[in-house]
Amino acid sequence: MKQYFHSVTLDKEKCKGCTNCIKRCPTEAIRVRDGKAKIIKERCIDCGECIRVCPYHAKKAITDSFDKIFEYKYKVALVAPSFYAQFKDKPDVNVILTAICKVGFDYVFEVASSAELVTEVTKNFIQKNNLPKPVISSACPAVVRLIQVRFPNLIANLVPLLAPIELGARLAKERAVSKTGLSPEEIGVFFITPCAAKATYIHEPLGIEKSLVDGCISIKDLYLRILPVMKQIKKPKMLATASTDGIFWAKSGGESFGLSNENNIAVDGIWNVIKVLEEVENQTVEDIDFLEAAACVGGCVGGPLTVTNCFVAKSRINHVLENTKLSPSLYTYSSDLDEAVRWEKTIDFEPIMKLDSDMAVAMQKLEQLEKINDNLPKLDCGSCGAPSCRALAEDIVRGFAKESDCIFRLREKVKKLSVEKGDAQ
Amino acid sequence: MSNRLLLHYNIDSADLHAAGEVSSTVKKILKQLGVAPEIVRRVAISMYEAEINSIIHAGGGFVDVEITTQKIFVRFTDNGPGIEDISLAMQEGYSTASQQVREMGFGAGMGIPNMKRYSDDLKISSAVGEGTVVEITVFINN
């Protein structure tokens, strides 16, 4: 089996082996072993929580180095709308896009444009198909992965349509081929990403076999490159075409805004998402038609690879177009898109928490787990390297840890030994 | 070696904010056992309803769960006021929940009907003034 690629990785040198990340991971995917954090690959959903909480910056998101774009003859930047919110003083979007061309790209495609199209298709899709309610947005790959590993019953609620990033890659590549006459392999499509989850997505796409995005450049990387260039641009090229409907996708609530249904909710922050999904699974939220869910607080503007504080950025999204003159878009909705953006394959449940493939064996392990857990102090201190006492019990049953990894159990043991030794003397 | 897993939980409080903790815990355990998602869902929903009921009506109680490779059996026991007319309580929309509870979004009269809908077998025995026992069975078809 091929190794699952993760953008979220550990810088061993910087890791101090503290307990911050293990306690904040929503899928209990991190343990501290031998003084260093270790990510359990099958469990990680690349939400980026650990990147945010690590005080030593030992957790990072792997994106491509900017030089990778020069491996291609023709370079396309897929610009996420969250990028526009990084700048203060409401710059003309045309200036931002022109600056991106000046630092090395040949063509820019606004993901906000494909987002507008996805909104149209989603509206039609929900109308024509009887999906279980609430219909859940599939735009955030971390949320889709979360559902895949933790909420298998809700896979059927996901909108089975390409996310704006993928539709954007397809449209941009098509356009670049017809414009240049080059072969698709000679054209490099790079997503300017706010998060690790999207950087993982291009290697491990959801709902399709292969992503057409060739690489990911982080927002903070490109931001620093174009900031000085923007100041020099007096006459920008007229490149901006996307309207607020697409640009609003950058913030929580933006996707639902375009759908104009009545009973929509937008949930942001992975822990809030989990809470709501638990309730949806228990069928206690029945009056919601559409659930927009983003792993990051604020939506994509809150991604761990952005520069600006998510609350500031969320407010800036409302004013992005104030100084921008839009040109007509080259990409408009047509009904053949309805079929073209459908997922090619289903998302399969990955039972990452399963103790054993044989249920009878799993039951024995669970019995043992409960027994061990009963003897642990229930302080969930994390000193053993597991996020909770129960997680340590699970690790012991799985054979990855031992009871004396618990410092309280160890202390008891030492005390007992010294008493015994004392008795012997 | 036992081929039966027994679990016991207390529903201590009459606090609605704690509602769903037991069903959540059992849901997590069933996922660890590799029980099919659809079965987990049915157990979770019917348990959640029963849990809410014991909090709303009886001020708590306790839960026994018995898991084998064939089925999941759950028994809720409380010392609450009891149910006067069980067949009436089985009807959709019938509820004796207080106004305060209803204002919090509960007491829609779907609790027992949902338990029936999502379980393979539901038994309720109750004596007024003594308490109620709710038994839920969901079979695992391998």
Image (spheres, rainbow, N blue to C red):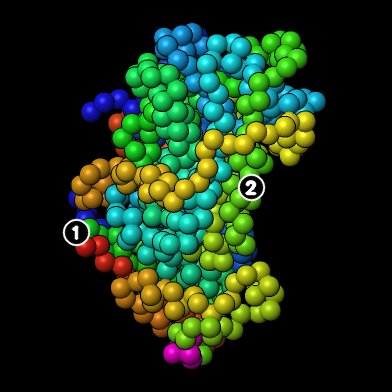
- Is residue B8 rendered magenta in the image? no
Check disc 1 and report the residue beneath it: B142
Between residues A113 and A294, which one lies in front from this camera angle? A113
- Residue B28 lies left or right of residue A304; in this view the side is left
Residue A239 in sight in this render: yes
In the image, is residue A116 above or below residue A190? below
- Chain of residue at mark 2: A
Q: Amino acid at mark 1?
A: Asn
The residue at 51%/55% (across/down) is A123
Name the spot of residue A319 as percent of width and height, x first: 76, 36
Residue B136: give x, y in percent of width and height: 36, 72
- Host chain of mark 1: B
Q: Report the residue at 41% width, 29% height from top.
A: A174
Where residue A134 appears, as percent x and y from the top left, is: 50, 59
Label 1: state its secondary structure.
loop
| Residue B86 counted in the magenta span | yes
| Helix, strand or loop status at disc 2 | loop
In the image, the segment drawn in magenta is B85-89
Q: Say which of marks 2 and 1 sits in front.
A: 2
A251 to A412, vertically: above or below: below
Could you tell me which residue is drawn at 34 percent across and 38 percent down?
Answer: A208
Residue A270 in sight: no
Residue bearing mark 2 = A253
Report the quarter where the C terminus of chain A lies: top left
Query: Label 2 sits on what residue type?
Result: Gly
Q: Using the image, determine if residue A122 lies above or below residue B90.
A: above
The CA distance from mark 2 to mark 1 is: 42 Å
